Image (tube, grey):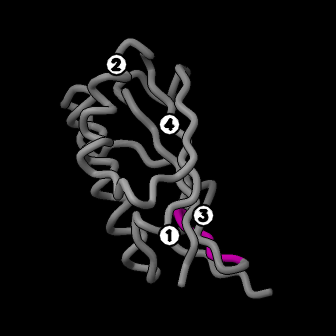
Amino acid sequence: MTITRKGLGVRFHQVVEAGGFVFLAGIVANDTSGDTAAQTKDILDQIDALLVSVGSSKAQIVTANIWLSDIKTIGAMNTVWDVWLDKENAPVRATVESKLAAPEYLVEIQVKAFKG
């Protein structure tokens, strides 16, 4: 099996392709000045771009993990998620409250998608 890694950062790759799947690292907003909805939109735009760059798409996401710094903001996150989601191909999903890497991050999303 071939493993392809892309987007090397200081500690990890942003994308790993293996076994017909694409694994994305946890994605946080580039612009942290916005609220939960704005940060979610930023993250989902990044996910779209990363998946397209490796020949996949949101329709091929099989699982999503979402971390919120405050679970009370799940409604704001879901409002953006629901518009973005390919409803015919919704992944399994877990959403939890957690301290994130820095206080300005309100949302982090990680996905695994099929490629092909």
The mark that comes first in sequence, 2 or 4, is 4
| Quadrant (top left/top right/bottom left/bottom right) for the N terminus | bottom right
- Tell me the mark number nearer the camera, choosing from 1 and 3: 3
- Total of numbered circles in the picture? 4
Which of labels 1 and 2 is toward the front? 2
The residue at which mark 3 appears reads as: 23
Q: Kindly identify which numbered label has been placed on residue 78.
A: none
Distance of mark 3 from mark 2, alpha carbons?
26 Å
Report if the CB atoms under discs 1 and 2 are less than 8 Å apart. no
Q: Which amino acid does label 4 sit on?
A: Ile
Which of discs 4 and 1 lies nearer the camera? The answer is: 4
Query: What x and y, as percent, mark residue 81?
Result: 32, 42
Q: Report the Cα–Cα distance between label 4 and label 1.
A: 21 Å
Q: Is residue 80 left or right of residue 107?
A: left
From the image, give the main secondary structure of the stretch colored magenta.
Answer: strand
Q: What element carries label 4?
A: strand
Please state which amino acid type lies under the numbered disc 2: Thr
Q: Quadrant of residue 39?
A: top left
Mark positioned earlier in the residue sequence (3 or 2): 3
